Image (spheres, grey):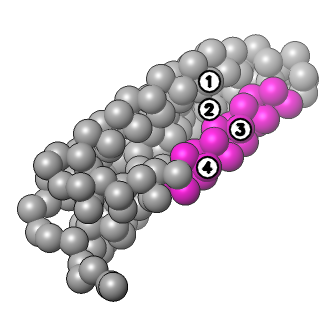
Amino acid sequence: GLPLASIGAVYLIGASVADVFHAHVVTARAQGGGAVRHLLLRTASRLALLATVIYVPVCVAAPFLFQWVFGREWQTSGWLMLLLLPMWWAAAVVSPVSRLLVVMDRPALKFAFDLVFLVAPIATLFSLRDRGINAAVFGYGMAACVAYVVYAALLLIASSDGRPAGPKVG
């Protein structure tokens, strides 16, 4: 249906942006003078606008669309999609610019995110297991969203990294 197609479109756009961002961040690092941070903020803000334009209307309409397209028994799935909106929005903004850590040679920061992203959502899901599916799914999504906020902060830190670029060949 439309909601799943929209999510797929955001994924494809994000993958394309990641490829282009990677190439541009290499150039920005060589330029220095805050070019990496500027590129990061400009790209993330454009991704935020795109994620808002696509995810908000689709997720808000999902409970009604799921019921209309798939039948009444699917309405709950639409509500769950809405509850995961913050996680999907944050992932759409942060993931495409995450290659910055590769270019800036900061794999430890990626590991820090991976650890938070692994532990926080699962711990939240476990802690809310007795509160019902809506609370558990919303808690999981919010914990994942917080993990992406941590990732964004780590990317911001790495973008101002004063370490010189790797050795130049030639």
Position above or below: 170 against 7: below
Q: Which of disc 2 and disc 1 is earlier in sequence?
A: 1
Report x, y in % for residue 113: 31, 61
Mark carried by residue 54 = 1
Quadrant of the rendering where the C terminus is positioned = bottom left
- The amino acid sitting under disc 3 is Ala
In front: 58, or 18?
18
Q: Judge the density around disc 4: few (<14), some (14-19), many (≥20) Cα neighbours within 10 Å.
A: few
Q: Which residue is mark 4?
A: 16
Mark carried by residue 9 = 3
Q: Secondary structure at mark 1?
A: helix
Q: Which of disc 3 and disc 2 is earlier in sequence?
A: 3
Mark carried by residue 80 = 2
Q: Which of disc 1 and disc 4 is earlier in sequence?
A: 4
Residues at marks 4 and 1, CA–CA distance in whole angstroms = 16 Å
Q: Secondary structure at mark 3?
A: helix
- The amino acid sitting under disc 4 is Ser
